[in-house]
Amino acid sequence: MSRPFFCCARGSASSPLALLRTTTRLRLPMPLRAKVTNPAFSRPYSSEMDTPAADDVLFNSIYGVRTIELNRAAKLNALNGSMISKIRPRLQEWEKSQLANIIIIKGAGEKSFCAGGDVATLALLNKAGKPEKSVEFFKWEYQLDHLIATYSKPYVAFMDGITMGGGVGLSVHAPFRVATERTMFAMPETTIGFFPDVGGSFFLPRLDGEIGTYLALTSERLVGADTLYAGIATHYIHSSSLPDVESRLAELVFEDTLSLPERWSIINDTLEEFSTGLPSTAPAVLTGSLRECIDRCFAHDTIEEIISSLPSETQHQEWATKTIATLQSRSPTSLRVALKQLRLGRDWTIGETFQREHYIATKFMSHPDFISGVSSRLIERPPTTPTWNPPTLEECPESSTDDFFTIPEASQRLNLLKPGAPEYSTYPHEVFGLPSEAQIKDVIKRARMPAKELVEWYVREYKGKEGVREKVREVLVRKAESDEMGFVVWKGILGL
């Protein structure tokens, strides 16, 4: 009996999503889950920090889909060495397998995708005089993150629930990052005397304006659809639909001749099938006049300039006062390192990012702020206020962090799992999220059209993707105006 095939249409050559989309999709019955329980892989990671657990990660096969389920719900799926030692070899094997088409990573339970790395254990190791054991953890973690960032097969992350720290490393470099109404994103490292790692040097400075700097220094949280508007997530789907999304992706069958971008394009179209609209109860948080404040204040290159600029933001005085207090409560060393890494990271490639971050993490494992921050915030009950050393910005000059960024010539850099992987300075899959401000600015410079026509053009080019209309309109209101001919130009303010 012949099998029914469904063909995907090609995108127009002028579209910002102009990727070839020719393939066939085989319609199959609802798949059965095939649970892989044989951990027949060598354990590359060995540390005193973890007791290997047989079920802290679950692997499943659904036709061409391979799933990774972080299974420490009681610990909010916090990432530890045992989990890394299981995930890494699976990904390496699946990358070589002709039967594995798509990788999906998710977290067990309803609260968390992954709330971060198990830093409490690392702090205890450091306190016991064994920082080299903690350094070993970061070696394996960053190698895994780089493997994901350069993976040669489609990789989809369900960021359902808390997504922080180490969980960000498992998801943010993926071409498809699905947020839900339960998503809570943050980079809280400066609160514990650390720095925004797991590739934060790469993805944070590439967010619109100074959003990345703001998130890195303040550890501000983004919830739900705000992660889509900020560029953290590429799609927004209700959590109740995720099982159906997984089954639908399992139905996809790719022709062998399809390139990776073509496969990405098909998956993007498939994810869009499950979009049921964005919440309309409140506007995006990092928009409008508050966003203008963020871009003005956090564009400075020193922490002192950022703090001194905040009181002048009288339109958002309460926010400014709170932000000053937040920054002053953070580790001065962490603030200095975080700001410098984001400025330098603008020019780092993806591979260089993880190598440099490994060196920075190594320095922090010998710094007292990490032990104090983690112990006070995460170990002691009730939590206490950390004692930073040095305690103030005045006692922590810019030069005090130079060693974090100066790798001695004799020092060996982190060995990446894929040393021959393509290097890039811009994500090759960035077209699957909402258009960035830089992309909108570029179109405005090249196209001559009124504001409303430009908004509708974007909606058509992105095939009605949820959030495009709202994002483009907000950017135009904040960053553009009409010239004497009624065409949009990039400057001033335009009321739509």
Image (cartoon, rainbow, N blue to C red):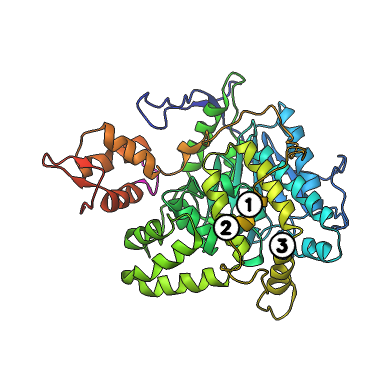
**Image spot of residue 365 (x, y percent):** 75, 58
Dominant SS type (magenta): loop
Whole-angstrom CA distance, mark 2 to mark 3, is: 40 Å
**What amino acid is labelled 3 in the image?**
Ala
Residue located beneath label 2 in the image: 398
Residue located beneath label 1 in the image: 402
In the figure, is residue 191 to the left or right of 227?
right
Q: Which residues are magenta?
A: 463-468
Residue drawn at the location 37% of the way across and 23% of the way down: 13
Residue drawn at the location 87% of the way across and 53% of the way down: 47
Observer-side mark, 2 or 3, equals: 2
Q: Is residue 336 visible?
A: yes
Q: Quadrant of residue 151?
A: top right
Position above or below: 145 against 192: above
Q: Is residue 464 magenta?
A: yes
Disc number for residue 73: 3
